[in-house]
């Protein structure tokens, strides 16, 4: 599965790389590097013309500023959204520290400029810049984008364009930076395939070090671009879209994405096996201006085997790897000391599932009792244990809001999505929370799920209203917020075969909900518009033909899809029309068993047969599947494929069942 | 225990808002592990009070704050710890203890001295002279609501120009007159004058016939000369304490040093200001 290029002569992708290598060495030009000046002198006078200039100045606590002249490689880590959204991102922070700990490597950060800033940059000829040294994008060897979601794609193109880097990978030469993407959206990179040089799906901690070594070699030895790409292609987990081409069936479906030359048939995701060996962030950057999360964050485990069928994160990050209580406590202590934050986030996909969570929370609560430091624990679990935990964390402090995610409104619907929680569970949990003095409960739901009926939709309102009535017994002002999102099928999940609801259908279902809860003043219904979900769905399950839509939408001015004030559905429908892509065919079509997906050659470790079986179990029988941390293995394929096992305190149960 | 500080907001942090700056202070206090007092109530806040907010993008060597601590702190340790915890550009240059019953801080902050830096504008001095000589200075003020004409002249205490820098001492009036409005007045006499490249609040205090008496030190800030030497940051952990203890001794101020026998006037003035111990 992980067979790599062997470098034989006669490859179609990198013809005669050996002679290209010699040529490069002969060329003395290749050893001199252009030096770039900081854009700060151009930037400073215009900063008062834009909103929130603090987004662009850097200068935060804990940043690393290095002199590029004495470095072997330079990385620009870009989160293609606004500073206040991107800066708190864990992935960027971790890789920033991992790379900067390498003595001859510099990593700086960049974020998408807000449209007012983009206008000023284009007017003044200011290129995309980093925040540490305010160097232009072209001063870097690698531009690495972190893609947590699909909505950053047009911003990615805009960043490259502002940076003066050719948008199409094939147009880049040795003087252009290597464009790399990672993050959850990298598990289907095909809608970005023409624009990126390298994709790495999975955990980046080890990969960036390996790639960095290749970059340093390339610079020292003056490799040309083909040679560099060839070497990068040897790295485990490196997917080079230019080494693959898609073929289509007459009916428009994909026949397959085929490697050219001797590129591997499938590229595996990267997985870090021991999180305790990577205790980052150690010195989290402290923003000078307000961001979406103002806290020191530590990931207490990675991966999730709850098996919610809609959840891409839970599927692609398997197996479960826990951090130990001691490592977490150490990270929290050092992290607070180095940042001055007053909140700690204990992050994961379902933090209450850490095998040692109660002990950990007890220890931390003891340590910070009576201080201004608060602890938060995002959790999607819906059971009384969640309240016990919340109580352990707050002690005598403030009890404001608790959040639960039943995800669906009826028992039947929850079985389909494998969210194993009964209505009694939800009500018991809410009752315990209100009884303990919590005043506000937030419930998260989705609509547009496979097999959903109006009864299931209204079930959300009924459940919300029942919780409101419960809350009223404990206090007249107790409130319930019901948040509803439209479901978007994602690659590498059992629901990857599903049809997505049309925006009209989502809007109609929202209306049903609104009418049902309109008279209840203590219930606050929150929802998003339906149209952005269509674009998200198109990009999530799109193939290389969708890349043309992304390019066209960018040319038409699409930016910041994740922001209501900037999202423009008309641009996207026009872009799709212009390039002849039928959006409905990509989003609304339920796929058959034999459908070849654009992401089939990216190996998340999950067996497609298992995903199909789980999909059929869901829609035909509403059959539930237990968490394999405490029940026998059901052979999703990840552990043997990666030669790994779960690393959790639940292992005794797991081991006993599987021998 | 309360202390009053004069601090700087220069460099990149001049682009952060007053709200952001408040957060920077709160984090620095936590990082420095100082026993800041908290307000009572459902959502306790650290007891720091800031004087009037600096407009976004302006630099300052004359910002002021009053802090209340729940336990006694050594002034020099407090300043050292905070300066080590601040991001670059925020810097306490002077701190004093406050005695009980001291007059409110704002009563010592009735005017600001501003420097407006211009790049090489011909006719610049004539424009400054014209502003100084004018009996009224009507400019159009555009803030919330409809634009209206206001006269800036009563707010101007002194104004001078030198070497591309306009130094102006503005009374704190309500609503405040901003240097950006003064620029409009200059532009009225010098059409097409480019905007200042940098506006810096030098210090705040009370107006005196020749300039301004800085609020914490009693130093004179005069129009036409800069009395505050650039702070020495070569040794950030020691510098503030040393600077603070010698800060009344800076030659350029023209004020006698603390050790001077003839300094009775200064000590009286310190008491009136609520300064128990200048550090």
Image (tube, rainbow, N blue to C red):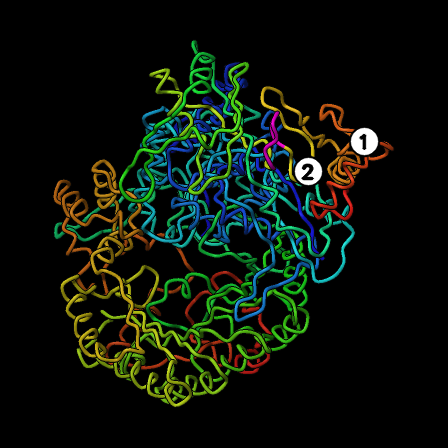
Q: Which residue is drawn at the image coordinates 76% and 41% (left, top)?
A: B268
Separation (CA) of disc 2 from disc 1: 17 Å
Q: Disc 1 sits on a residue from what chain?
A: B
Residue B224 point in image, percent of width and height? 59, 19
Along the polypeptide, which appears first: circle 2 or circle 1? Answer: 2
**Which residue is outermost to the top?**
B122
Question: Residue B257, which numbered label?
Answer: 1
- Please give the range of residues in magenta: B206-212
Question: Residue B93, which numbered label?
Answer: 2
Residue B235 point in image, percent of width and height? 75, 34
Q: Nearer the viewer, residue A165 or B161?
A: B161
Q: Is residue A259 left or right of residue B214?
A: left
Q: Secondary structure at mark 1?
A: loop
Question: Residue A360, which numbered label?
Answer: none
Q: Quadrant of residue A104?
A: top right
Q: Which residue is drawn at the image coordinates 40% and 56% (left, top)?
A: A603
Q: Is residue A657 left or right of residue A539?
A: right
Residue A457 point in image, percent of width and height? 22, 77
Q: Quadrant of residue A322?
A: bottom right
Q: Quadrant of residue A172?
A: top left
Q: Disc 2 sits on a residue from what chain?
A: B
């Amino acid at each position: 599965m992980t067979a790599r290029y062997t470098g034989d002569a006669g490859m179609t992708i990198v013809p005669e790389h050996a002679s290209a290598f010699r040529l490069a060495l002969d060329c003395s030009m290749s050893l001199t590097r252009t030096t770039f000046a900081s854009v700060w002198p151009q930037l400073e006078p215009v900063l008062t013309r834009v909103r929130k200039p603090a987004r662009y100045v850097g200068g935060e606590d804990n940043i690393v500023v290095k002199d590029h002249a004495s470095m072997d490689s330079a990385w620009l880590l870009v989160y293609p959204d606004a500073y206040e959204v991107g800066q708190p991102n864990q992935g960027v922070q971790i890789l920033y520290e991992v790379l900067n700990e390498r003595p001859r490597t510099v990593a700086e950060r960049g974020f998408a400029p807000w449209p007012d800033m983009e206008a000023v940059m284009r007017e003044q000829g200011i290129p995309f810049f980093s925040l540490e040294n305010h160097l232009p994008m072209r001063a870097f060897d690698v531009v690495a984008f972190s893609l947590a979601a699909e909505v950053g794609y047009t911003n990615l193109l805009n960043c490259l364009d502002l940076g003066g880097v050719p948008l199409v990978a094939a147009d880049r030469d040795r003087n252009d930076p290597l464009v790399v993407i990672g993050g959850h959206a990298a598990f289907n990179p095909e809608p970005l395939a023409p624009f990126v040089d390298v994709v790495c799906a999975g955990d980046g901690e080890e990969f960036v070090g390996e790639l960095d070594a290749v970059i340093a070699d390339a610079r020292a030895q003056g490799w040309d671009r083909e040679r560099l790409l060839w070497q990068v292609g040897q790295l485990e987990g490196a997917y080079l879209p230019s080494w693959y081409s898609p073929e289509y069936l007459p009916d428009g479906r994909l026949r397959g994405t085929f490697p050219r030359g001797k590129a591997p048939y499938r590229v595996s995701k990267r997985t870090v096996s021991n999180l305790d060996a990577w205790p980052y962030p150690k010195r989290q950057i402290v923003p000078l201006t307000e961001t979406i999360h103002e806290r020191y964050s530590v990931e207490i485990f990675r991966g999730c085997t709850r098996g919610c069928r809609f959840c891409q994160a839970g599927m692609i990050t398997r197996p479960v790897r826990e951090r130990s209580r001691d490592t977490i406590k150490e990270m929290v202590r050092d992290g607070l000391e180095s940042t001055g934050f007053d909140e700690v986030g204990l992050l994961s996909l379902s933090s209450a599932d850490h095998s040692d969570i109660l002990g950990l929370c007890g220890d931390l609560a003891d340590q910070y009792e009576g201080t201004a430091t608060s602890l938060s624990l995002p959790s999607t679990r819906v059971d009384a244990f969640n309240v016990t935990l919340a109580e352990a964390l707050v002690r005598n402090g403030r009890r404001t809001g608790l959040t639960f995610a039943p995800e669906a409104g009826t028992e039947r619907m929850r079985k389909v999505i494998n969210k194993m929680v009964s209505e009694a569970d939800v009500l018991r949990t809410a009752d315990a929370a209100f009884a303990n003095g919590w005043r506000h409960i937030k419930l998260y739901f989705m609509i547009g799920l496979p097999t959903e009926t109006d009864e299931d939709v209204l079930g959300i309102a009924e459940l919300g209203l029942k919780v409101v009535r419960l809350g009223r017994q404990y206090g007249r002002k107790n409130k319930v917020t019901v948040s509803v999102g439209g479901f978007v099928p994602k690659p590498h999940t059992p629901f990857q075969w599903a049809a997505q609801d049309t925006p009209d259908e989502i809007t109609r279902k929202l209306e049903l909900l609104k009418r049902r809860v309109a008279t209840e003043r203590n219930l606050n219904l929150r929802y998003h518009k339906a149209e952005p979900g269509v674009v998200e769905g198109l990009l999530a399950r799109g193939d290389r033909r969708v890349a043309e839509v992304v390019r066209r939408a960018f040319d038409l001015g699409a930016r910041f899809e994740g922001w209501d004030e900037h999202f423009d559905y008309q641009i996207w429908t026009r872009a799709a029309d212009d390039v002849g892509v039928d959006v409905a065919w990509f989003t609304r079509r339920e796929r058959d068993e034999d459908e070849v997906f654009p992401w089939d050659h990216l190996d998340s470790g999950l067996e497609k047969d298992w995903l199909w079986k789980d999909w059929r179990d869901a829609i035909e029988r509403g059959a539930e599947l237990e968490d394999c941390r405490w029940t026998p293995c059901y052979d999703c394929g990840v552990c043997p494929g990666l030669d790994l096992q779960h690393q959790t305190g639940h292992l005794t149960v797991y081991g006993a069942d599987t021998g | 225990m309360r202390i009053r500080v004069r601090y700087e907001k220069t460099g990149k942090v001049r682009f952060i808002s007053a709200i952001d700056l408040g957060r920077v202070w709160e984090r620095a206090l936590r990082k420095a592990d100082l026993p800041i007092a908290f307000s009572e109530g459902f959502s306790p806040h650290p007891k720091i009070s800031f004087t009037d907010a600096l407009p976004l993008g302006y630099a300052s060597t004359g910002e002021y704050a009053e802090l209340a601590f729940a336990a006694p702190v050594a002034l020099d340790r407090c300043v050292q710890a905070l300066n080590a915890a601040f991001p670059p550009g925020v810097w306490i240059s002077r701190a004093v203890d406050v005695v009980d019953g001291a007059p409110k801080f704002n009563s010592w902050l009735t005017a600001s001295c501003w420097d407006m830096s211009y790049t090489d504008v011909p006719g610049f001095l004539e424009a400054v002279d014209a502003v100084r000589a004018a009996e009224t200075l009507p400019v159009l003020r555009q803030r919330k609501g409809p634009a209206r004409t206001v006269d800036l002249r009563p707010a101007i205490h002194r104004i001078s120009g030198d070497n591309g820098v306009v130094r102006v001492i503005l009374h704190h009036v309500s609503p405040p007159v901003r240097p950006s409005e003064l620029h409009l007045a200059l532009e009225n006499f010098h059409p097409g004058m480019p905007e200042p490249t940098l506006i810096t609040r030098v210090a705040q205090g009370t107006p005196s016939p020749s300039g301004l008496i800085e609020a914490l030190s009693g130093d004179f800030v005069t129009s036409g000369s800069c009395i505050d030497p650039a702070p020495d940051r070569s040794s950030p952990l020691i510098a503030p304490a040393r600077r603070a203890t010698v800060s009344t001794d800076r030659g350029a101020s023209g004020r006698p040093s603390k050790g001077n026998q003839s300094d009775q006037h200064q000590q009286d003035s310190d008491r009136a200001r609520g300064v128990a111990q200048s550090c």
